[in-house]
Image (cartoon, rainbow, N blue to C red):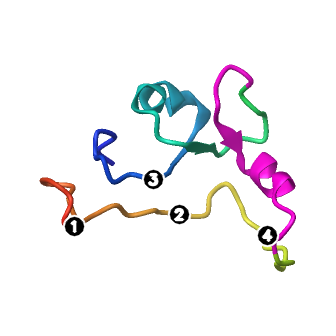
Amino acid sequence: MRVSDPSAKLAISAPEELHKLVPTGVPTILTSRKPNKDSSSLSIEELIESSDHLYQLPQVKLAQSDTAAILYSSGTTGQAKV
């Protein structure tokens, strides 16, 4: 993701990459169970706990070896298309 992209509304980041996002001011959700008290980011668990309007979703078993991807396009080679 181009963190300088002005249309970025939210970032999802591993804690070790947070330092790259802090200067952008983009709200960030951390993929960690341990909250980072030194920033304004939230862990996914904190986000869920702070929402009282979430639907009950089925539990899904995941393994650390499972593949995941969040693709970001429409501007990765230039300005975002508005």
Q: Which amino acid does label 1 sit on?
A: Val
Frontmost residue, 20 versus 82: 82
Q: Quadrant of residue 30?
A: top right
Q: What numbered label is drawn on residue 82? A: 1
The answer for how far apart the CA atoms under marks 1 and 4 are is 37 Å
Residue bearing the label numbered 2: 68
Locate residue 53, reporting x and y percent.
83, 70
Where are the magenta residues, as a range?
37-54
How packed is label 3: few (under 14 Cα within 10 Å), some, or many (20 or more)? Answer: few
Residue in the picture at 64% in, 36% down = 41
Q: Which of marks 2 and 1 is in front?
A: 1
Count up the numbered dots: 4
The reply to whether discs 4 and 2 touch (Cβ–Cβ < 8 Å) is no
Q: Position of residue 62 (x, y in %)?
A: 73, 65
Judge left or right: residue 4 versus residue 16: left
Check contact, mark 3 vs mark 1: CB within 8 A. no
Q: CA gap, disc 3 to disc 4?
A: 29 Å
**CA neighbours of label 4 inside 10 A, class few (<14), some (14 to 19), many (20+):** few
Q: Name the residue under label 4.
A: 61
Q: Assign the C terminus to one quadrant of the image.
A: bottom left
> Mark 2 and mark 1: span between their CA atoms?
27 Å
On residue 9, the disc is 3
Where 49 falls versus 18 (above or below)?
below
